[in-house]
Amino acid sequence: MTTAVARLTIVESKLFLRDTTSVVMGVAFPAVLLLLLGFAIPGFRDATDDLDGLRPIDIYVPIVLAMAICTTSVSVLPTYLATYRERGVLRRLATTPVGPVRLLGAQLAVNGVATLVAVGLAVAVGTVAFGVDLPRQAAGFLIALVLGTAAMFAVGLLIAAVAPRAKTATGVGMLVYFPMLFFAGVWTPGPVMPDGLRRISDFTPLGAASQAMQDSWSGTSPSALHLVVMVGYLLVAGALAARLFRWE
Amino acid sequence: MPVIEISNLHKRYGETVAVSDVSFTVDSGEIFGILGPNGAGKTTTVELLSGLRRRDGGTVRVLGKDPDHDGAALRELVGVQLQESELPERIRVWEALELYSSFYRDPADWRELLDVLGLSARHNARFGTLSGGQKQRLSIALALVGNPRVAVLDELTTGLDPAARRETWALIESVRNRGVTVLLVTHFMDEAERLCDRIAVIDAGRTVAVDTPAALIAKVRAERGLDRATLEDAYLALTGHEIGV
Ligand SMILES: Nc1ncnc2c1ncn2[C@@H]1O[C@H](COP(=O)(O)OP(=O)(O)OP(=O)(O)O)[C@@H](O)[C@H]1O
Ligand SMILES: [Mg+2]
């Protein structure tokens, strides 16, 4: 059974790598976006008082990481799973000793690794190209990254669970994707985010993840509120997804 | 000893009764066919005995085990080819076979299956680029790759060209000669007559006849006083149609 799980994960990785859209959007895009922002937008590499003496590029690294999490979790993952269900891939696996749950596991693993690679690439671009410091609170940052990813993957699983068809999963994924990015501060980064918006952002999984990563980056521990919100989404969306998921 | 025993099988989807009362037994080493009109409940029957769904009534034993309780053990022993089940678009033929063979304790040699099913030339092709018949052959190969004791094949030759159908028949016979019991669903009378030792005709969720093709034909001849009759005549008579002579 271990070889079966290993093979399943290898095959799913190959399928992911053959899917140019997933690789470009899910893995490469966050780093590329950072390069574009840093080199193409005037002033992005200049410290400003509006950002408490930081440069916009410093603030944008954790936001771009939140985007990396968002793309794999609510765009790639639900589409894959819903497509597998629609095509009967899950049903066919249900007739074998391995069963469909392990395919779900392999998909989570592949998308999890893809997210970490995207995060690694973006952090590397930030440090190498723009001299952005590494997170001051390394442990807090890792906790925020892992919890945020887990919470968002639970949301992605929930989308896959409720969407009857692959097209619906993609559509619902997009409906969730942009608001999530909005609350993560893509358009109103860090200190620029209005207080009212921040109140809402606190209670969204990606907003909490983005702020927790931002905090740990500048040396503050992630706030209890943000950690609780991420754990809450993980548990509630995860449990709902497990309840509602249909194999066909 | 019967390998499959089904009695008074019943299954509803909400208000729809998909299988009302189906009974038949399949003996070891038999090639057993299920015939019946669209929507008769053939696929549902197959899904119930493969443990893909839970029945609402009746009893089912496959190799002495109840699929609703011993599903895990049966999945090792029963190979299933589902109607309308695809693979991921970008998976290569050999990857699918290698992957599925890793699921079983004692798999068949998938390279040999590739050869037997005439897929060797396409072994590196992506699933999405295969023709309908090639997809079907791969699907059959996946049902056999675990070296099953029972092979359940739902519409195995639908979409195959005549030559490929003949080759698949030969394959099924060779599989049976290795001691595998075969249950197949088909809409092709020539296929049923040529391959099947016995046939169950299912109509509107009920078994209306279980017998050898020859006996089914003889019965319709006797009943209707015909000089000659075909399996198709017998099938049409059993499913409530007039026989145009
Ligand atoms: N998942 C489902 N949900 C609801 N109704 C279903 C479902 N699957 C099948 N049915 C209904 O159950 C009945 C039997 O369907 P089934 O697929 O078993 O027929 P079949 O004999 O295999 O037909 P065909 O020759 O067209 O493949 C049909 O009326 C069908 O509409
Ligand atoms: Mg059917």
Image (cartoon, grey):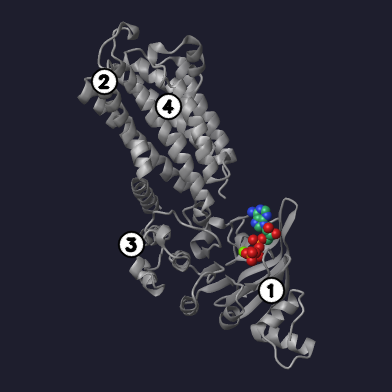
Q: Position of residue B31 (x, y in %)?
A: 57, 77
Q: CA distance from mark 2 to mark 1?
A: 71 Å
Q: CA distance from mark 4 to mark 2?
A: 18 Å
Residue A121 drawn above or below residue B127: above
Q: Chain under label 4?
A: A
| Numbered circle sitting on residue A134 | 2
Q: Position of residue B107 (x, y in %)?
A: 40, 65
User: For the point 39% across and 39% down, which residue is it?
Assistant: A111
Residue highlighted by disc 3:
B124
Disc 4 is placed on an element classified as helix
Q: CA distance from mark 3 to mark 2?
A: 44 Å
Please tell me if label 1 and label 4 are on a single chain: no
> Mark 3 and 2 residues: CB-CB less than 8 Å, in contact?
no
Q: Position of residue A149 (x, y in %)?
A: 42, 30
The amino acid type found where label 3 is placed reads: Asn
> Mark 4 and 2 residues: CB-CB less than 8 Å, in contact?
no
Badge 3 density bin: few <14, some 14–19, many ≥20, Cα 10 Å? few
Residue B23 drawn above or below residue A191: below
- Camera-side residue of B126 and B172: B126
User: For the point 57% across and 34% down, which residue is it?
Assistant: A240
